[in-house]
Image (cartoon, coloured by chain):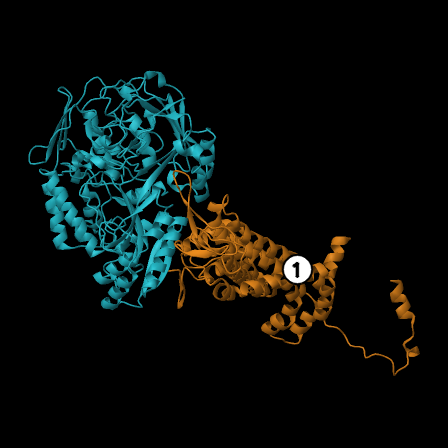
Amino acid sequence: MAIALTESAEPPAQVPELLAPEISGRSPWALAWRRLSRNRIALASLVLFLLIVAVCLAAPLYANDIAHVNPFASNVTGTTIVNGHRVPLMRQGGGVLKLGETPIGPTWHFSHYFLGADQEGRDVMARVLYGGRSSLEIGIGSAVLCCLIATVVALIAGYFRGLTDAVLSRLMDVIWAFPVYLLAISISTVLLTNSAGLKIGPVHIVASSLWLPTIIIAFIYLPYVYRPIRGHVLSVSEKEFIQAGIAQGASDLRLIFSDILPNVVSQVIVLLPLMIATTILTESALSFLSIGVQAPNASWGTIINDGQDLLYTRPWVAIAPGIMIVLVVLALNVLGDGVRDALDPRAKLRVEA
Amino acid sequence: MISIPAISEMPGFSSRRVRRRVVAAALTALALAAAGCSSKSAPSTSASSPAGHRGGVYTILAFSNFGTADPAQNYTLEEWQLLYDTHDGLVQFQRVGGAAGNKLVPDLATAVPAPTNGGKTYFFHIRRGIKFSNGQVMKPSDFVTTFERQFTVPGPTTFYNGIVGASACANSSKTLKCDLSTGVVADNKNYTLTIHLTAPDPEFIDKLALPFADVVPSGTTMKLTGNSVPPGTGPYMWKSYNPNTEAVLVRNPYFHVWNPLAQPAGYPNEIIEKYGQTVSDEVTAVENNQADEVYDGDTIPPDRLNELNSAKYASRVHINPLTADWYWAINTVKPPFNNVMARQAINFAANRAAYVTIAGGPSLAAPTCQILPPNFPGYKPFCPYTSGTNFTKWSGPDIAKAKQLVAQSGTKGMKVVVNSTTDSTGKALAAQMVSDLNKIGYKASSVLLNGGIQYPFVQNSNNNSKWNITYSAWYQDYPAASDFLNVLLGCGSIHPHSNASPNIAEFCNKSIQAQMSKAEVLGETNTTAANDLWAKVDQEVTNQAPWVDMYNPKQIDFLSSRVHGYMWNPQLYILIDQQWLS
């Protein structure tokens, strides 16, 4: 406050005209980025997230050019090199009974089953990277899809109000009334166990497509994004500039997408990283239950499922994708907080107050 | 495990393929002298064991319950192992360990009769002085109620459809009325029972040894009894059954030994089966002697299996070969596998060593190429789909031969859909089959379905455009070659548009069918000649390649250190009440 008074006390006339800098306004986005870039923890989270994305995108490079493995094909009778010796990927149990077959553990050698093999003799490292691609694609895809649809519906409901709002809000309430995982499991069980997949008119999505879990997860979280956005739309549509637009005869579409949307989009952006974290967790849970990503595709959830029978002898099969999930979700949550602080600093002030 | 609603929706043979769902039945065929049995299970009977071993509570741990408890409907090994101790039928397999356990002996009947009237009539003298666990005297007329309940309670099988009058009971599950008085004639005065069949059924006497035919008292409700089990005549009776917690068997105060070979007295005072623990927890509890038996031995996780290899458990783990097949059924009516050369090609390419590894290794499975399992009537080692020149044993895939056959069949590059289940074994088997198919030039992909729906799905011909090759498994009902060859690959086992069509491959070869029919008739008079003919049929079917046979599994029983007297019966499996506790 003192600084502001000092600055305002200085008469502009005292500044030599030639030295006066050109006064240019900063856009809200530039201000937000400036605030975000000053938040080192949020930036570190962003870097970590991008690093994981980059590593996962490099999965084919690792599988084809470094490990020389097919992470989707069974290889139970295959071999690899450990300490210069060729060894089978699956080792028969010892003792008198010789029960069971145990896959090899981590070799810590990038070109020879770095994290070991799973029960089907597949390279765990390569599968974790490919699994990351699936988890991230579904997580980001479903969060974006969810935010997109929820925002459009919220804009329509909040702007038109009345019957439109009542109908759309009640529809969302119906979805909200179901526990998230119960709804996800129910829909997934129906769609993924049907070998024909999903058919809506000319659109046909096969059961093994990543689009199915993406759509299911986006659907179940619609009300969770719709609710806050609709509230914001209701608030914005009461503002004077909207009333002025109506008085000037602006069309509904123009008012919704040119005037209201820009004022609520920051809310959507704040929600997006948090939604991605949530949808990645949901995808992992569904895949762990075998009703998410379908074989031979991998996701972090399916790999944990593969590893649960090997927890005692080959814990890395389950631990490695678990660590990846923790890192991504942590990074996105911290980043989400940073984005919220950057786009809506008053929220932080309110919290701190 | 399949849920009970699923079972009730699957008439016929549908549930038998589910692992550990099935057990045994009968046959006198002592040609089974080498029948699979553990080297650790010496033939013996309780009669020779000291009575001082009586007492204690024998505790079994199971992951899930066995569903409805009504013996007229339940088709699970899990309940059958308990029913063997609480109920009796007219005949039973000799309750001893080893190959002698294949012998059929009289139980509530005084003798095992030979059929008369051209194989259509069975006449039994019924034992007197036997009471049910509720104190009611057992009479021949109780068997009439028992067989009528087979039709009024919606059961999963058609084992007794050949009884005279049964055809009129087709809708009995709705009316709760079924009159078998002409087919099952009871004489309570002379204690005799006569069963009339509409046509000869050489396996009928075997079917009478199944728990479906265990006698229940007259007056038992004709409806499904749900979670209560009608009284039986065995050494134990059902005290309670709560599917969420446990089943408890206690001693039947009215029991006395009438034929120790069929129903000896048991040792433990109580037998308790507890539900709800993970298989891994079951193993831990039995390792620590907090329970006595892991029921789900075939689903012990790989890392816990490795633990059981320790020397300290060696005497507590029992492994026995099963007369069962794990196989891929090939869709023989749809390209590419409507071409026999394409079917033979994938048989040559199949890496059976990999399938055995997935099953837990050579200690738990043995590779096979043929339909009939070892130690089974009609079994003669035969494997045309192997590398090398020894065609009695699989030694490795022959990829070159497979590729040559694919080229000759003109099916190279065609798409193939592999159907399997979503459990870890189903996924692994599918991945290996996809790999085997891709190796010889097909474009394979997999579709995995929940275990509860996969089997009815692939049986129904309405779905046969959605798969080319599907995983399945079959465990014997009774040791007769027809239980594999005719039931699974006979023309009469194709039921279009039905979820209960056990010939999944829809394989029908008129010439082979004629030989199967001939072998069944021959079995009534000349078992040896019949088995020779079954062996020929087995080879001819194998050459036609309607399946890719993978392996014959083995059973693991893991027991606490306080359990003694373990016996493995090839028909009844572990004889629970014949073990004593220290």
In the rendered image, residue B218, in percent from the top left (x then y), is placed at 23, 25
Chain hosting mark 1:
A
Q: Chain A is drawn in which colour?
A: orange
In the rendered image, residue B402, in percent from the top left (x then y), is placed at 27, 62
Read off the residue under disc 1.
A45
Residue in front for this viewpoint, B271 or B2: B271
Say how many tags the image has.
Answer: 1
Q: Colour of chain B?
A: cyan
Indicate the quadrant containing the N terminus of chain B: top left, top right, bottom left or bottom right. Answer: top left
| Residue in the image at 62% along x and 72% along y | A255
In the rendered image, residue A239, in percent from the top left (x then y), is placed at 69, 67
Residue in front for this viewpoint, B335 or A34: B335
Determine whether, in the image, residue A3 is placed left or right of residue A203: right
From what the image shows, is residue B302 above or below residue A116?
above
Mark 1 lies on a secondary structure that is: helix
- Toward which corner of the image does residue B545 lie, by quadrant? bottom left
Q: What is the three-letter code of the residue carrying label 1?
A: Ser
In the rendered image, residue A336, in percent from the top left (x then y), is placed at 65, 59
